[in-house]
Each structure stands twice: as C-alpha cells, then as structure tokens.
Image (cartoon, rainbow, N blue to C red):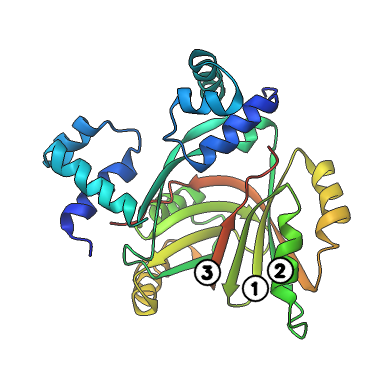
Amino acid sequence: MIELDDIDRALLRALSQDATQSAGALGREVGLSQPATWRRIKRLTDNGVIAGRRLDLDREALGFGVAVFLGVKLATKGRVSLEDFERAVSAIPEVQTVEHVLGMYDYRLRVVARDIADFERVLRRRIMTLPGVGDVEANVLLSEERRPGPI
Amino acid sequence: MLDDTDRRILRQMQADPSLALPDLADLTGISSARLSRRIERLRDQNILRGPRAVINWRALGYTVEVSLRITLDKTQPRAFDDFIAAAREIREVIEIQTFLGRVDLRLSVIARDMAHYQAIYRDQLLSLPHIADIEALMHVARIKSDEALPL
C-alpha cells in the first residue's frame, strides 16, 4: 500500500475526471514541473493505484436506453462450479459488470439493453439459461452518480 | 445521428482507450484526418467523454467494499433528495444509484477494514434520513468490470 500526499490526491482527483490532461497541464494546476508530475503519475500507475483508463460513453445516445442491475442466486451450489457460471455470464456482451457478493445474492450483474423488450430477450435467452441460475431480482437503474471517494 | 463508422471508432477506443490516433486509423481503416474529425464531433456532442483514470481502492488500502441496498420511507415527500444530499457528504460512498424495483437506492461504500466499515455504518450510514430498510451485500470479487457497451 502506498502513502499519498495532497499533491498525489489532487492528481488522482483530476485524472479520474479526465485522463487526457497532459503532465504539463496537470503540473501547472498543482504547482509542479512537467517531469515531476510525470514521475508522480508513473508512481501511481506502477503501484496499481491507477488501474487503467476507461471511456465514458453516453449510454443512452448510443441506443442503450435501459440499464438493469440483477441480483442472481445460484440454485445448485456445489453442483455447478462457480467458474462455469462466471465464464458463461462474462461472455454475454450485454452484461457490463459481474461481481461476486455475499448476502441475499451470490452475484450482482449490470446489464444494458436497448429497451425493456430487448432486456426481456436478454433475460430470458441469456441470463435464465445460465448454468445453475436460481432466483433473479431485477432493479431498473434510474440515475447514477459516481463520487470522488476518500481522496 | 451515429452511423456504423462512429460505432466502429467507439468500439476500438472502448477496447483500448490509450490507442494513438495512427493506430486507431489502422484498426478502423479510416484516414487519420477523417478520424480526428469524427472524434471531435463525438466529443462536441458529449457522446464521447474521457477517458477517465480508474482508481483501484484496494491499492490505497481500502480492502472492504459493501453494496448497501436501501428502501426509503416514501411517505416523506423529500425522501430521495434529503437522503442523496446527506449520502454525498460521506467520503467513503463512491457510488449513488437510484432504482425502479424492490430497492430504491444503492450506495457503494468502501472501508479500510471491517472495523472501519462498522464505524462508518454506525456513525454515518445509519443516520442518513428516511431509511425504511437497509440490506448489505459484501463484495467478494470483481469478475468482469470493463463496463463496455456492446456496440
């Protein structure tokens, strides 16, 4: 685990908003030279704090009007291996995230679809046919907000 | 309106957000000049944003992640607004989502360890306004997390 100072935190906050900013531009904001800023970003990346870069696409403008979170409970634990379920569910293009959780459900999935009819197709043909799938609960996403977190 | 060329560009950018323009031109078979015009237009329309840096909280010592599913007391007319405004004040809340379904809201909460989580839960989360019911899913593993759209 690495220790961050205020400058590291400012850089992380800025990059998690927009990772296209150059080391020079970021350096001017935090009061560092371009090479010193670059070295700090490299350290954050090398230590795995910056895990990667992700595009932020307007889902609805691209025709995916519906996002649904599914809580999935496996019906036949022990008989179906978790790996088989995970491999099959991860291969579904409409499934954006798969999280293994403890609690009322075993897995939490984020699914996108063009509309509710399209979602029903994905649910019936792809999700309900997965190996070992039991109870499924669906909640349609209305709004979401990502927060900067404790930095 | 978006056409197949736009989708082809976004598909490649989504797969690797750090691709340089000439590589992207090779992969999509579109000339660099046309490509940069297209990208500029997608950015102007705000369909394409970022990339943003993805922070790995685990590398910063946050080993616990909990999904809190919350039902609100809807007899309170301002339940959603009050709750969301108060949840924004908690630094360890990294995501706030609202739903149509069995649960009204979900918070993603991170903590350094279980003791830290318990402190946040008791002192801050339970005192959020208008909670009718609260349910926790403890995060075990992230199986798929690219959040890619099936373009």
Q: CA distance from mark 1 to mark 2?
A: 6 Å
Badge 3: residue crowd in 10 Å (few <14, some 14–19, many ≥20): many
Which residue has dot 2 on it? B70
Query: In terms of secondary structure, where does tag 3 sit?
Result: strand
Which residue shows up at 14% across the image and 43% down it? B34
The dot on residue B122 is: none
Q: Can residue A74 be seen by looking at this rendering?
A: no
Q: Are marks 1 and 2 in contact (CB under 8 Å)?
A: yes
Quadrant hosting residue A103: bottom right
Which residue shows up at 73% across the image and 47% down it? B91
Q: Disc 3: which chain?
A: A
Q: Is residue B80 left or right of residue A74?
A: right
The kind of residue on which mark 2 rests is: Ile
- Residue B7: x and y in percent read 23, 54
Quadrant hosting residue B45: bottom left
The kind of residue on which mark 1 rests is: Val
Q: Is residue B59 left or right of residue A126?
A: right
The kind of residue on which mark 3 rests is: Leu
Q: CA distance from mark 2 to mark 3?
A: 14 Å
The dot on residue A141 is: 3
Residue B7, placed above or below residue B81: above
The dot on residue B103 is: 1
Query: In terms of secondary structure, where does tag 2 sit?
Result: strand
- Residue A59: x and y in percent read 39, 61
Earlier in the chain: of badge 1 and badge 2, it is 2
Badge 1: residue crowd in 10 Å (few <14, some 14–19, many ≥20): some
Quadrant including the N terminus of chain A: top right
Which residue shows up at 42% across the image and 44% down it? B50
Q: Nearer the viewer, residue A55 or A13?
A: A13
Q: CA distance from mark 1 to mark 3?
A: 10 Å
Q: Nearer the viewer, residue A136 or A143?
A: A143
Query: In terms of secondary structure, where does tag 1 sit?
Result: loop
